[in-house]
């Protein structure tokens, strides 16, 4: 698996021993903090990577962003 280069304040850590499940974490964590973070991520790894569309029962109007504009206003990109 080829991973993209990261800024110096970030690094890759892996949730498995085969190094197939990479996550990006802060580079300045103490070893104990990193171990605890990875422990939590491993415990809940089934929830990682889900999209909101994968969560049945949640109304899309709750998580969708809309910009309310007046009808006569033409949108512009700045």
Image (spheres, helix red, strand yellow):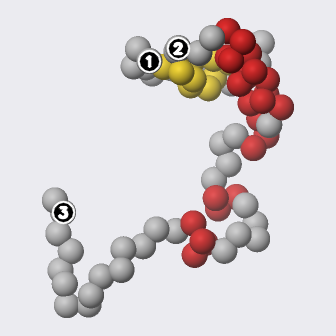
| Pointer 2 or 1: first along the chain | 1
The disc label shown at residue 23, or none: none
Asked if 51 appears above or below 3 in the picture, the reply is below
**Number of the front mark, 3 or 2:** 2
* Residue 5 appears anywhere in the view: no
- Which residue of the protein is positioned furthest toward the bottom in this rendering? 72
Residue 9, percent across and down?
44, 18
Crowd rating for badge 2 (residues with CA inside 10 Å; few <14, some 14–19, many 20+): few
For the C terminus, the quadrant is bottom left
Residue at 68 percent across and 17 percent down: it is 33
Q: What residue does disc 2 label?
A: 28
Q: Position of residue 57 (x, y in %)?
A: 76, 71
Which residue appears at 70% of the width and 40% of the height? 48
Is mark 3 in CB contact (under 8 Å) with mark 1? no
With 50 as the anchor, is 78 left or right in this view? left
69 vs 54, nearest the viewer: 69
Q: Is residue 66 visible from the viewing direction of this image?
A: yes
Read off the residue under disc 3. 77
* Circle nearer the viewer, 2 or 1: 2
Q: Which residue is mark 1?
A: 9
Looking at the image, residue 61 lies above or below residue 50: below
């Amino acid at each position: 698996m080829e991973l993209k280069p990261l800024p110096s304040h970030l690094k890759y850590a892996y949730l498995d021993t085969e190094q197939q499940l990479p996550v990006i974490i802060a580079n300045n964590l103490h070893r104990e903090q990193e171990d605890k973070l990875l422990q939590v991520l491993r415990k809940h790894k089934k929830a990682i990577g889900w999209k909101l569309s994968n969560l049945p029962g949640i109304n899309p109007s709750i998580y969708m962003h809309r910009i309310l504009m007046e009808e006569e206003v033409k949108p512009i990109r700045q």
